[in-house]
């Protein structure tokens, strides 16, 4: 879908592990930075969008809801949304872009706040619900001891190795690239590059995924302000257009689908725009687990199905100075688990030329960012016109 929507402000709170600052205050910090970036006042905001809303049974995963932020900041919202039953994290941005394109709002605060590292440190404040029975989607995985998304993704990675010859050395290039870029990002958790030896010698989590294939629990909030085209005269920043967006759901289950939802989403993205994969200057691809970034490379047409391992072999093509700079802020493997929103934030940083030591050379004008893996997927194509 093409839109008349623009990202006009970006903000991010402190990013850390085990932070003492409350998650609502981290959210407010990120909102203030985004408003200052856009040159807007809170009185000009009339919409809020988030994923997945406040998760009362698992506050570490999502401790702040849209209504809570509206009440805290005194926002007069003509439209707002927050829920988990969408195409994935960046689906909240899709919803906001749709709202401003339809005239339901002019400036929408989109946010994602996570507090998983702090909650592990203070479980008495953020208890996790432990059901006494297996039900819902987990009934198809838990009986087989597949309790974690690491297990669910690992089955796809194993299949890729069997059918297409993916190697661990090829898979490692995602983690190595992310750590190298994170070392250039002052807000990232990782501050030095990872070596191939460190990667190969690390403990396995769920074969073939090792410790460095898994993202890092993080405490942070990331905010994007999505504005209508006819409201751009109210902002002082350089707007970035949402040139296209797509999303899909594959049975809403990790159980036995042949391909992840990213493949249908990637194909749909290009149907909604005149841009092509060859126009993309940087790709910010969801890497909750390293293998997910490979599926997005194939899904978006940067390489053929089954070729992602060979496409990134050696790491030169996806390096900061390569043909397709990947996850320039460090991604979730290096910068921290910002749960999808960090990729849109970094895309805007790059398109505005504000990346400092991690800035893509030349004059980047088009970026793609994604979120989700397995049954859920969202892709945004961002352009600086």
Image: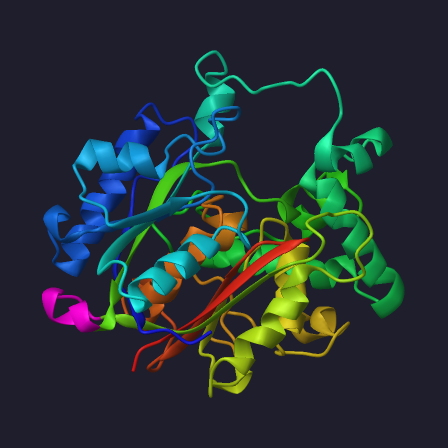
Going 71% across and 44% down the picture, which residue do you hit? 210
Q: Residue at x 33, y 82 (%)?
A: 363
Query: In x, y percent, where is residue 341?
Result: 42, 52
Q: Report how many numbered discs are placed on residues in the image.
A: 0
* 108 displayed left or right of 180: left
Q: Give 195 or 284, whichever is nearer the viewer.
A: 284
Residue with the most extreme right position: 162
Quadrant of the rendered image containing residue 113: top left
Q: Which residues are magenta?
A: 230-238
Q: Is residue 79 magenta?
A: no
Residue placed most toward the observer, 311 or 265? 265
| Left or right: 302 in relation to 327 | right
Residue 315 visible (yes or no): no
**Residue that appears at 74% across and 45% down:** 152
Colour scheme in use: rainbow
In reply to whether residue 236 is colored magenta, the answer given is yes
**Drawn side of residue 317 relative to residue 45, left or right:** right
Identify the residue at the far top of this view: 124
Can you say whether 236 is above or below 195 in the image?
below
> In the rendered image, which quarter is residue 356 located in?
bottom left
Pick the quarter of the image with the C terminus.
bottom left
Residue 299 found in image quarter? bottom right
**Which residue appears at 32% of the width and 68% of the height?**
101
């Amino acid at each position: 879908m093409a839109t008349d929507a623009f990202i006009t402000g970006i903000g991010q709170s402190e990013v850390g592990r085990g932070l003492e600052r409350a998650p609502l205050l981290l959210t407010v910090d990120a909102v203030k930075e985004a408003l200052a970036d856009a040159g807007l006042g809170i009185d000009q905001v009339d919409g809020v969008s988030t994923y997945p809303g406040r998760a009362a049974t698992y506050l570490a995963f999502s401790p702040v809801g849209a209504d809570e932020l509206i009440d805290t900041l005194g926002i007069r919202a003509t439209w707002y949304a927050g829920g988990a039953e969408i195409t994935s994290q960046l689906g909240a941005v899709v919803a906001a872009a749709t709202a401003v394109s339809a005239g339901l709002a002019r400036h929408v605060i989109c946010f994602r706040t996570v507090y998983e590292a702090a909650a592990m440190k203070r479980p008495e404040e953020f208890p996790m619900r432990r059901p006494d029975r297996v039900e819902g989607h987990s009934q198809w995985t838990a009986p087989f001891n597949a309790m974690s998304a690491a297990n669910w993704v690992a089955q796809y990675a194993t299949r890729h190795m069997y059918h297409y010859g993916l190697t661990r050395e090829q898979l490692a290039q995602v983690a190595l690239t992310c750590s190298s870029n994170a070392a250039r990002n002052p807000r990232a958790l990782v501050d030095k590059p990872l070596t191939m030896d460190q990667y190969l010698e690390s403990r396995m989590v769920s074969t073939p995924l090792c410790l460095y294939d898994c993202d890092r629990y993080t405490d942070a909030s990331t905010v994007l302000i999505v504005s209508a085209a006819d409201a751009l005269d109210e902002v002082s920043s350089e707007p970035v257009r949402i040139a296209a967006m797509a999303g899909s759901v594959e049975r809403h289950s990790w159980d036995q689908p042949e391909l992840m939802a990213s493949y249908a989403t990637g194909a749909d993205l290009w149907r909604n725009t005149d841009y092509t994969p060859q126009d993309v200057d940087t790709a910010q691809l969801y890497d909750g687990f390293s293998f997910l970034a490979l599926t997005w490379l194939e899904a978006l047409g940067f390489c053929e199905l089954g070729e992602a391992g060979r496409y990134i072999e050696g790491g030169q093509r996806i390096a900061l100075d390569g043909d397709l700079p990947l996850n320039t802020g460090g991604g979730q493997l290096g910068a921290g688990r910002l749960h999808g929103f960090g990729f849109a934030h970094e895309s805007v940083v790059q398109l505005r030329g504000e990346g400092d030591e991690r800035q893509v050379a030349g004059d980047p004008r088009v970026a793609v960012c994604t979120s989700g893996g397995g049954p859920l997927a969202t892709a945004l194509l961002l352009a600086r016109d």
